[in-house]
Each structure stands twice: as structure tokens, then as C-alpha cells.
Amino acid sequence: MSVPTWAGFVAYFPDDEVATRDEIAVYGGRNVAAALGEILAGLGCSHISDPDYGGEVGWDFAFRYGDRHSFWCRVQSFHPIYWLLVEGPSGRRGERVHAELRRKFAEALEQDPRFDQMLWRTSKEGPPDWDEFTVTDDLPPPAILEELPHIPVKLRPKAAGGPLAPVIISAWCALAVVVLALVENTIHAAKERTEYSTLAVVTLIVGLAVVLRMIDWRRKRRLQSSGENPDPDL
């Protein structure tokens, strides 16, 4: 099953980018990300985080669908065209849940008059092309400031492993408990038991760090293949 994870659409929200003629202080899209979070809440999603700023790649937020299915969304603004990336659980069951939510989400967006020309693409395809959209010429001009105000925007460090990090860390902790229990039951000498326990813990910590960074590397490669500049903090 290949669940569409990319979407492109037109949304005539106010352009909330903050910029002068020479530089951009805050990239737009927060208002659209917040609206998408409200739509997802109406579909039964919970634990919806506030949009977090990721610089030129836009705004992202996390949420849950059902009891334990974690998702992550990112909105990138090219007002009035927007890219949407939705990442969800993997595996056969996870993809079924992702497909179910994607169908409901797509239907809700189609019925919402604020969104237009919704186009979905797979992860391999990446976002739609610009020429697939029709944009009217009567848009208000963007607001250009003479001087940027002081806006304390703090980039949120991206957790290693992305939205899958809590699941992976929980599984790794369970593995650590099992390994330490095996050491405790099979090695009787106190000194050797301590040494093997320390070695096991260090090995598990290093292994966890490697797994999380490998997931980050794969996410970067996927974003690069779609033609984007990936966030270096991912």
C-alpha cells in the first residue's frame, strides 16, 4: 500500500509572512497549519501540538489518531499555494490507519471552502508541480515592512528519530530490561555481573543513538529526492 503523504493546495488565507524588501524574518503558513489542526481535531484526532517554526521549510505539528497512532504534519507556504507533508506510522497496520485518516482528511478539506485544488502525491512522487494549480490575479499584494520588528522566533530542535522516536525509545527500554534481567540470571559473580551490565547498557545506548540518526538520515534523503532543502536540524 502506498499512502499519499504529500499534498499541494491553494488556500486564500492572509499571507502571514513577515518580511521587508530585503529579507524574510518569519516564513508564512502558521495560520494554515493551525486551521489544519482544527480540522484534524474535528476528525477525532487528539494531542494536537501548536505549530512549531522550522524556518524556510515552514511550520510543523504533531497529533494522534486513535489511541496510539502518532502523526506529524508540516506546512510550507508559497502563498497562496501550500505544500503539506503528513508522516504517520509504518507497517501494514500503520499504513491502513494512515490511509483511513488520509481519506477522511481529504474529504474534509474538499468540503472546506477555504481550501481549493487539493492534489495528493505519494512520498516517492513528492509535492505537485507549480503548473498544476490555477491562481487568480486579484490577490492583495503581500505586506512589505520598511523595518523588521523584533520577533523572538526560536527554532525548535528536531528530536532524533522524528515522530517515531517515542515508540523506538520505549521499545529500546523494554529491550534493556530484558537484557539486564538475562545478565542478572545467568552471571552469578557480582563483579562480572556489574561489568556485563555496564557493557550492555552502553551498547544499548549507542545502538539507540545510531538507529535514531539512521531514521533522520533516511528522512533527509526522502526530502532531498522530492526537490526540497531539508532542515539541517531534522
Image: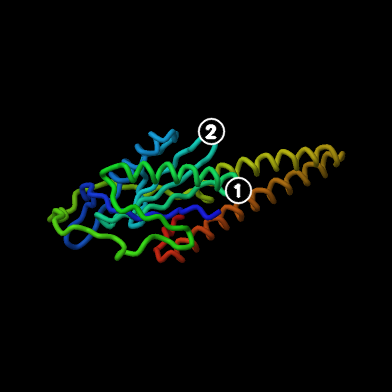
At horizontal 70% and vertical 42% (from top left) the residue drawn is: 176
Frontmost residue, 11 versus 160: 11
Q: Nearer the viewer, mark 1 or mark 2?
A: 1
| Residue 171: image location, x then y, percent | 64, 42
Q: Quadrant of residue 24?
A: bottom left
Assign a secondary structure to mark 1.
helix
- Residue 97 shown left or right of residue 173 in the figure: left
Q: What residue type is labelled 2?
A: Asp
At horizontal 35% and vertical 51% (from top left) the residue drawn is: 75
Mark 1–mark 2 contact, CB under 8 Å?
no
- Residue 51 shown left or right of residue 79 in the figure: right
| Residue 60: image location, x then y, percent | 39, 47
| Image: 3 above or below 62 | below
Frontmost residue, 2 versus 90: 2
Q: Report the disc number at residue 107.
A: none
| Image: 152 above or below 222 | above
| Inter-mark Cα distance, 1 to 2 | 17 Å
Q: Which amino acid does label 1 sit on?
A: Arg
Assign a secondary structure to mark 2.
loop
Please name the colour scheme applied to the rendered image: rainbow
At horizontal 86% and vertical 41% (from top left) the residue drawn is: 186
| Circle 2 crowding by C-alpha within 10 Å: few under 14, some 14–19, many from 20 | few
Frontmost residue, 76 versus 27: 76
- Residue 66 shown left or right of residue 24 in the figure: right
Q: Report the disc number at residue 67.
A: 2
Q: Closer to the N terminus: mark 1 or mark 2?
A: 2
The residue where tag 1 is placed is 92
At horizontal 33% and vertical 46% (from top left) the residue drawn is: 110
